[in-house]
């Protein structure tokens, strides 16, 4: 794993000090002495950089420079020791051209944005045609990198130790590039991801488009479209894309050997009905935990009108306990039943049904309720009755509650696709959208952020790129730091008082 360390933070060796002195001398010469070269090259430089003449008395201060040292996973030092002296100050145009398409896909840019950026940097712009061709070249490579990574993770998903069988549970969630609010779905394109529960990686994805730019143009001009690889692969409503894609994915993954026996999805029943009809009638549907938990909060707020003691503070305490007790009884319906039974007693100071696993009052009855008003148990008997009836309904669903899944990772994947194909720009008329979804898959599967760009560079015969690798490692470190902080916060929230 990569490491990051700072050096030269105020303390230098005599060698570094000497180096700095000689650099300052070079700087002084460059900035302060008369320029004797009057050839064409320097003239054109001056035409472009006239400020260099007017502000030549200003010498940038480099004494406060801090070096960051970056090590990759194998411990190789990726920091060029003097990169800021000999680094690529002038980027050759072909290097830009080679990597342009990839950056377009990775960063969610189109031809307009790329040329805008180039023109601001005073670099010759590129034609639409050239970008299209290059995007196709690199897009195919990105798709194959994504396919390889999916095969690799499918295997890991099947072999990862769990309860001794090779059953695979996956979560599926579709997203549309343009989506009407509420019930209207007018999007021309959509994609869907299938993520393995054990590894959390994408093991299959599909995209659907109802538009093709070439066919469209031919239609407008009244011509017959030229022979082309048509981009249109779906007719029907946008809403119907999801069941279609899920059936397609499950079939395909099953044919490759992944024994998918259960899927996690939203509460929409069309998808599972279609799966049972077309693939396997025994396939199990698990509920998404957020969809199961939301109603209970609403019910508690309804009860608030009836019971004045049920303040928002008490509601959030009950919700916290509920979430914890459900998480604690994962896979064990019996335990969930016991826990829910205790939940209508524990806040009222009755610990007869509690378990020593989570209730601290059994060991020490004198402690206080940190999250309840005045640190005291609730007194309202009528409220206790209402809560008991409410939880009774959930006890009947204990089987469902014990096997909750989450489509959270699909949702985060959809965000990453949205960054590469922003909803306000339309990429659905060409294969560009497919490449962008594939890029998101490669990104999720090969590691955080831009590590996949290195793989794509290598696969398409380009140099892996020192700076590409450097940034990839840095981003990876940042992501892991964020994750570590998030886990600690979550652990803190889990404590029950
Ligand atoms: Zn077409
Ligand atoms: Zn208790």
Image (cartoon, grey):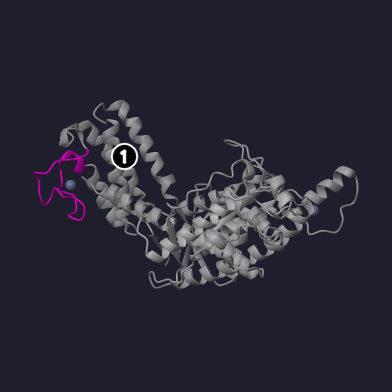
* Residue 488 in the image, given as x and y percentages of width and height: 31, 53
How many labels were placed on the picture? 1
Front residue (pair 355, 100)? 100
Report if residue 339 lies within the magenta region: no
Q: Ligand 2: does it lie within 8 Å of the C-beta at label 1?
A: no
Q: Residues within 10 Å of mark 1 (few under 14, many from 20)?
A: some
Q: Quadrant of residue 56?
A: top right
* Residue 114 in the image, given as x and y percentages of width and height: 68, 49
Residue 165 is at least partly visible in this image: yes
Residue stretch rendered in magenta on the structure: 345-371
Image position of 293 with respect to 200: above or below: above
* Residue 158 in the image, given as x and y percentages of width and height: 48, 71
Residue 202 is at least partly visible in this image: no
The prevailing secondary structure element of the residues shown in magenta is loop
Q: Residue at x 66, y 47 (%)?
A: 121
Report if residue 370 lies within the magenta region: yes
Q: Residue at x 29, y 36 (%)?
A: 315
Quarter placement of the C terminus: top left
Is 71 situated left or right of 427 in this image?
Answer: left
Front residue (pair 311, 421)? 421
Image position of 384 with respect to 490: above or below: above
Quarter placement of the N terminus: bottom left
Front residue (pair 44, 229)? 44
Name, please, the residue furthest toward the right.
223
Front residue (pair 187, 262)? 187
Task: Determine the secondary structure under disc 1.
Answer: helix
* Residue 155 in the image, given as x and y percentages of width and height: 51, 72
Q: Which residue is mark 1?
A: 390
């Amino acid at each position: 794993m990569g490491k990051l360390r700072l050096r030269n933070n105020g303390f230098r060796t005599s060698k570094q000090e000497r180096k700095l002195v000689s650099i300052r001398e070079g700087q002084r010469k460059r900035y302060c002495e008369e320029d004797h070269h009057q050839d064409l090259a320097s003239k054109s430089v001056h035409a472009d950089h006239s400020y260099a003449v007017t502000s030549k008395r200003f010498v940038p201060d480099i004494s406060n420079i801090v070096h960051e040292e970056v090590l990759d996973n194998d411990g190789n030092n990726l920091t060029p020791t003097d990169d800021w002296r000999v680094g690529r100050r002038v980027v050759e145009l072909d290097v830009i051209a080679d990597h342009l398409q990839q950056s377009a896909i990775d960063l969610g840019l189109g031809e307009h944005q790329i040329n805008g950026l180039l023109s601001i940097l005073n670099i010759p712009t590129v034609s639409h045609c050239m970008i299209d061709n290059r995007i196709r070249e690199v897009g195919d490579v990105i798709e194959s990198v994504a396919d390889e990574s999916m095969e690799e993770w499918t295997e890991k998903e099947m072999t990862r130790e769990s309860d001794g069988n090779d059953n695979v549970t996956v979560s599926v969630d579709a997203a549309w590039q343009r989506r009407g609010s509420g019930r209207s779905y007018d999007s021309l394109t959509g994609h869907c991801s299938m993520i393995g529960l054990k590894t959390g990686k994408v093991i299959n994805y599909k995209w659907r488009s109802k538009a093709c730019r070439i066919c469209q143009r031919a239609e407008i001009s009244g011509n017959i479209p030229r022979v082309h690889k048509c981009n249109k692969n779906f007719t029907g409503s946008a809403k119907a894309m999801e069941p279609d894609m899920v059936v397609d994915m499950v079939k395909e993954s099953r044919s490759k050997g992944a024994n998918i026996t259960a899927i996690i999805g939203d509460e929409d029943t069309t998808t599972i009905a279609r799966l049972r009809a077309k693939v396997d009638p025994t396939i199990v549907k698990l509920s998404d935990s957020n969809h199961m938990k939301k109603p209970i909060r609403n019910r508690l707020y309804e009860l608030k009108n009836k019971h004045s003691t049920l303040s928002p503070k008490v509601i959030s305490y009950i919700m916290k306990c509920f979430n914890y007790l459900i998480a604690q009884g994962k896979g064990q319906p019996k335990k969930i039943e016991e826990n829910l039974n205790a939940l209508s007693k524990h806040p009222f100071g009755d610990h007869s049904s509690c378990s020593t696993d989570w209730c601290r009052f059994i060991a020490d009855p004198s402690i206080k309720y940190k999250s309840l008003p005045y640190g005291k148990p609730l007194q309202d008997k009528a409220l206790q009755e209402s809560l008991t009836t409410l939880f009774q309904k959930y006890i009947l669903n204990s089987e469902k509650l014990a096997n909750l899944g989450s489509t959270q990772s699909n949702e985060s994947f959809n965000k990453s696709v949205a960054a590469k194909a922003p909803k306000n720009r339309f990429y659905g008329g060409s294969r560009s959208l497919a490449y962008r979804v594939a890029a998101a898959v490669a990104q999720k599967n090969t590691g955080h952020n831009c590590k996949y760009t290195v793989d794509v560079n290598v696969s398409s015969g380009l140099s892996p790129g020192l700076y590409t690798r450097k940034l990839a490692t840095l981003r990876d470190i940042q992501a892991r730091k964020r994750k570590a902080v998030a886990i600690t916060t979550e652990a803190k929230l889990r404590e029950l008082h």
